[in-house]
Image (spheres, rainbow, N blue to C red):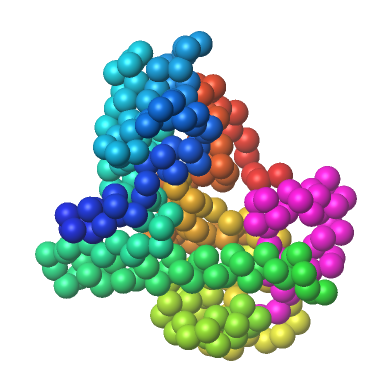
């Protein structure tokens, strides 16, 4: 990983009003020139958590927690400083370009950025197949039988990969992604790769490369800050974004609840 320039950090801080950021997590009540709330970092009955718009800081007079908007995200999300910076940058549409010391690191950064974009767009395409398109009707019926409503499918951005050898690849290439991007992403595989899933029964003959996922309901996998990492039900390959031992399905949505409960029930499979 590279270093985030101080100018970028200052720009992100200036674009993220601390009242708006904290107010997106829980309600704040105006108290004179400041805002107050029950502190999220300890149990209390009388609000001692104060947010100052003029100073762009927060402080709890009960437990002593306090600092900048970055510190709040770090403490509330239980994450590190670079992750907090990236989360706040994404909130206001600022691209974080890190300083790197070697050309190889620059290439890795560019690859990661391309793959994040590709996976995000792919997840949306799979989702529209399931929710809006005729090709997704059998998958919709299957999910209904399993008790998965349309509302749940939308909330978790479930998708469907058509039972064709090249539907996704053709769509992605039309959007400007090249063969290297698609293969590195793990969403397309070359003909000489071993296909571990012998139950996919598409009846078209594959060319030099073909879609890894065919006739599949898709469950997007995210990291703990919500970045797309892989679309999974058939075992996904490890990629620059996806390390099987480092992710849990649904963690980005449940992280805060897990912190508050101090426990988690981990189950095998998505459904």
Instruction: Judge whether residue 170 can be spotted in this image.
Output: yes
The residue drawn where x is 56% and y is 42% is 253
Question: Viewed as shown, does residue 186 lie left or right of 112?
Answer: right
Q: Is residue 155 magenta?
A: yes
Question: Viewed as shown, does residue 149 lie left or right of 58?
Answer: right
The residue drawn where x is 37% and y is 32% is 33
The residue drawn where x is 67% and y is 86% is 205
Count of numbered labels shown in the rendering? 0
Q: Is residue 236 magenta?
A: no
Q: Quadrant of the N terminus?
A: bottom left
Could you say which quadrant of the image residue 55 lies in?
A: top left
Question: Viewed as shown, does residue 250 lie left or right of 90?
Answer: right
Which residues make up the magenta segment?
A: 136-165
Residue 269, image x, y percentages? 64, 44
Instruction: Judge whether residue 216 can be spotted in this image.
Output: no
Residue 179, image x, y percentages? 45, 83
């Amino acid at each position: 990983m590279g270093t985030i320039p101080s100018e970028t950090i200052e720009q992100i801080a200036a674009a993220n009003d601390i009242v708006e950021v904290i107010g997106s997590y829980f309600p704040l009540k105006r108290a004179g020139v400041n805002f107050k709330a029950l502190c999220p970092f300890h149990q209390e009955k009388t609000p001692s958590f104060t947010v100052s718009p003029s100073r762009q800081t927060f402080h709890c007079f009960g437990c002593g927690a306090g600092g900048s908007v970055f510190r709040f995200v770090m403490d509330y999300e239980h994450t590190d400083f670079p992750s907090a910076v990236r989360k706040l940058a994404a909130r206001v549409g600022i691209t974080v370009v890190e300083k790197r010391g070697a050309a190889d690191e620059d290439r890795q950064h560019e690859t990661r950025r391309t793959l994040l974009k590709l996976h995000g767009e792919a997840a949306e395409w799979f989702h529209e197949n399931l929710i809006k398109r005729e090709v997704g009707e059998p998958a919709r019926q299957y999910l209904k039988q399993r008790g998965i409503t349309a509302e749940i499918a939308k909330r978790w951005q479930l998708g469907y990969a058509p039972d064709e050898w090249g539907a996704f690849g053709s769509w992605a290439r039309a959007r400007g992604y090249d063969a290297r991007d698609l293969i590195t992403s793990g969403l397309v595989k070359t003909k000489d790769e071993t296909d571990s899933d012998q139950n996919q029964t598409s009846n078209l003959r594959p060319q030099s490369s073909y879609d890894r996922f065919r006739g599949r309901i898709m469950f997007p996998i995210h990291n703990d800050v919500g970045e797309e990492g892989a679309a999974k039900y058939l075992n996904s390959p490890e990629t620059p974004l996806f390390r099987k031992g480092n992710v849990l399905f649904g963690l980005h949505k449940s992280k805060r609840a897990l912190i508050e409960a101090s426990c988690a029930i981990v189950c095998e499979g998505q459904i």
